[in-house]
Amino acid sequence: GGTTNPLVVRGDTTAGNRRVSLLRFPVPTTWTADQRVLLSLTTSTTTGTAVTQAHVYGLEDDTWTESGTSFSTLTSALRQNVGSGTVIANNLVANQGTTAKILGELLANSTTASEKLIDVTDFVKSQADGVASFMLVQDFRWDVKLPEKTPGDLQNAGLRVASRESTTGPKLRILATPVPTTAAPTFSPAGGTYTTAQSVSLASAKIGRAHV
């Protein structure tokens, strides 16, 4: 539901038990070349300490709503009537590379939540409508698990992600490269007389700026 905390991302052998999560942010439509955008998610495993993974997708469809969207209505991003199973053919994401673009992966190995950062700069800057939507999915990554050679890719756990109802909910962090300012050099020792044969120690102050 739209007020659930935490959000859950989980693959499952049964299609009806799978869980994906959606995020949406208002974003600027004008950017400078040096600005970077990081998606901040506070994440943990649903159980255990095994490394647990999910993919982060950027969605071109921003029409979904917290209370009115389901698997069956988000047809621009989710395949319908997918059979049960844990191989690549059972994955849920539709229109990969067009209206659903993979941006990175989310990893956790503890039930203690911590912040994870994913660079989503190019995708967010491309959203001329001023809205950026994301979908978190635990895809099946292979048909045969190695080295066990067992079929499918059912991970040991899912991921929990703090929602906006939490104090550590999802954020977009917008960063800019620090801009140096020129300061007058200082000389050591001060007040000395210098010739070309002497060494001079120069120190220049640098002032940085970052937007968060």
Image: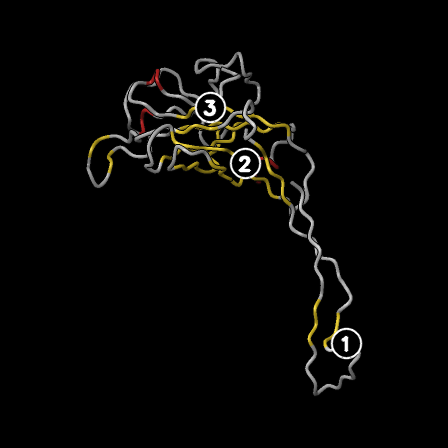
| Labels 3 and 2: the sequence-earlier one | 3
Could you say which is closer to the camera, residue 189 or residue 26? 189
Q: Which residue is mark 1?
A: 190
Image coordinates of residue 91 in percent, x first then y, are 35, 26
The image shows residue 208, relative to residue 86, as above or below, that is: below
Q: Which mark is residue 69?
A: none
For the point 74% across and 58% down, which residue is it?
181
Residue type at mark 3 is: Leu
Q: Determine crowd level at label 1: few under 14, some 14-19, many 20+ residues with C-alpha closer than 10 A.
A: few
Mark 1 / mark 2, whichever is N-terminal: 2
Vertical side of 9 occupied by 32: above or below: below
Task: Identify residue for label 2.
Answer: 39
The kind of residue on which mark 1 rests is Ala
- Residue sitting at x 56%, y 28%: 167
Q: Amino acid at mark 2?
A: Leu
Query: How far apart are the two marked residues, 3 and 2, measured between alpha carbons?
Result: 15 Å
Q: In the picture provided, is 172 more to the left or to the right than 156? A: right
- The numbered mark, 1 or 3, whose residue comes first in the sequence reads 3
Residue at image mark 3: 7
Q: Would you identify the image quadrant in which residue 168 lies?
A: top right
Quick one: SS at disc 2?
strand
SS for callout 3: strand
Rendered residue at 54%/16% (across/down):
66
Give the foreground label among 1 and 3. Answer: 1
- Residue 74, position in %: x, y? 48, 17
Marks 1 and 3, how far apart in space? 61 Å
Q: Is residue 80 above or below residue 9?
A: above
Q: Position of residue 165 (x, y in %)?
A: 55, 22
Quadrant of the frame with the C terminus: top right
Q: CA distance from mark 1 to mark 2?
A: 48 Å
Residue drawn at (48%, 31%) of the image: 57
